[in-house]
């Protein structure tokens, strides 16, 4: 049984969960409710933005890649309407470039999937500004390549054709790389 964290959460337990993986978002909503949050779910950028603009929550967990667009649009809407909102960006396509873009858009933390309710809760409630310990496992060459591609992709405002041109890569090849999960 999850512990009730109402004292740490504060007077406003509102939580917006935006993810297009319906079973995942339902499980996460149940787990977060047991911890003392008051979750509301959305499965698209449009629905997430509508909630963010009409009743901005104190906390939010937003998936980066959604069927109808980029979760950073929801993050920006939340920042606009409620600057004190604690936002965690969640993604199965973890990369340094997307983490940087998420933080620049206003996210307070960034987690790679699979993340469980404990990881999400810790990220939402973390007030610690200390730097994490350095990784014991440095990135592989494939991962460094992936990170570079993601950084250029973000610099080009997620424009595939421009990114492919700058990387001297065929556009279709780049699309295939971007569609895959990041290497370890």
Image (tube, helix red, strand yellow):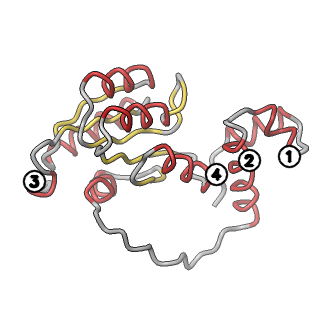
Q: Which mark is residue 167?
A: 1
Marks 2/4: CA–CA distance: 15 Å
Q: Residue at x 32, y 28 (%)?
A: 52
Q: Which mark is residue 141?
A: none
**Contact between labelled residues 4 and 2, with CB atoms less than 8 Å apart:** no
**Contact between labelled residues 3 and 1, with CB atoms less than 8 Å apart:** no
| N-term mark: 3 or 2 | 3
Secondary structure under tag 4 reads: loop
The residue that mark 4 highlights is 182
| Crowding near the residue tagged with mark 4, few <14, some 14–19, many ≥20 C-alpha atoms within 10 Å | some
In the displayed structure, would residue 130 be above or below residue 50?
A: below
| N-term mark: 1 or 2 | 2
The residue that mark 3 highlights is 4
Secondary structure under tag 3 reads: loop
In the displayed structure, would residue 171 be above or below residue 87?
A: above
**Quadrant in which the C terminus appears:** bottom right
Q: Residue at x 66, y 68 (%)?
A: 139
| Crowding near the residue tagged with mark 3, few <14, some 14–19, many ≥20 C-alpha atoms within 10 Å | some
Nearest to viewer (mark 3 / mark 2): 2
Marks 3/2: CA–CA distance: 42 Å
The residue that mark 2 highlights is 152
On the rendered structure, is 151 left or right of 78? Answer: right
**Contact between labelled residues 4 and 3, with CB atoms less than 8 Å apart:** no
Nearest to viewer (mark 4 / mark 1): 1
**Contact between labelled residues 1 and 4, with CB atoms less than 8 Å apart:** no
| Crowding near the residue tagged with mark 2, few <14, some 14–19, many ≥20 C-alpha atoms within 10 Å | some
In the displayed structure, would residue 62 be above or below residue 112?
A: above
**Contact between labelled residues 2 and 3, with CB atoms less than 8 Å apart:** no
């Amino acid at each position: 049984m999850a512990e009730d964290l109402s004292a740490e959460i504060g007077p406003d337990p509102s939580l917006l969960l935006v993810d297009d993986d319906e079973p995942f978002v339902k499980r996460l909503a149940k787990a977060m409710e047991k911890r003392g949050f008051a979750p509301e779910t959305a499965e698209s950028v449009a629905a997430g933005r509508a909630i963010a603009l009409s009743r901005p929550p104190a906390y939010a967990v937003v998936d980066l890649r959604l069927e109808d667009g980029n979760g950073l649009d929801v993050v920006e809407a939340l920042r606009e309407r409620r600057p004190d909102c604690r936002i965690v960006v969640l993604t199965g396509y973890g990369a340094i470039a997307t983490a940087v873009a998420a933080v620049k858009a206003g996210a307070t933390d960034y987690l790679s999937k699979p993340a469980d309710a404990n990881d999400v809760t810790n990220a939402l409630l973390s007030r610690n500004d200390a730097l994490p310990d350095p990784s014991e496992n440095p990135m592989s060459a494939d991962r460094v390549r992936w990170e570079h591609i993601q950084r250029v992709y973000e610099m080009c405002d997620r424009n595939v054709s421009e990114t492919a041109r700058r990387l001297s890569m065929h556009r279709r090849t780049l699309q295939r790389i971007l569609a895959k999960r990041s290497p370890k």
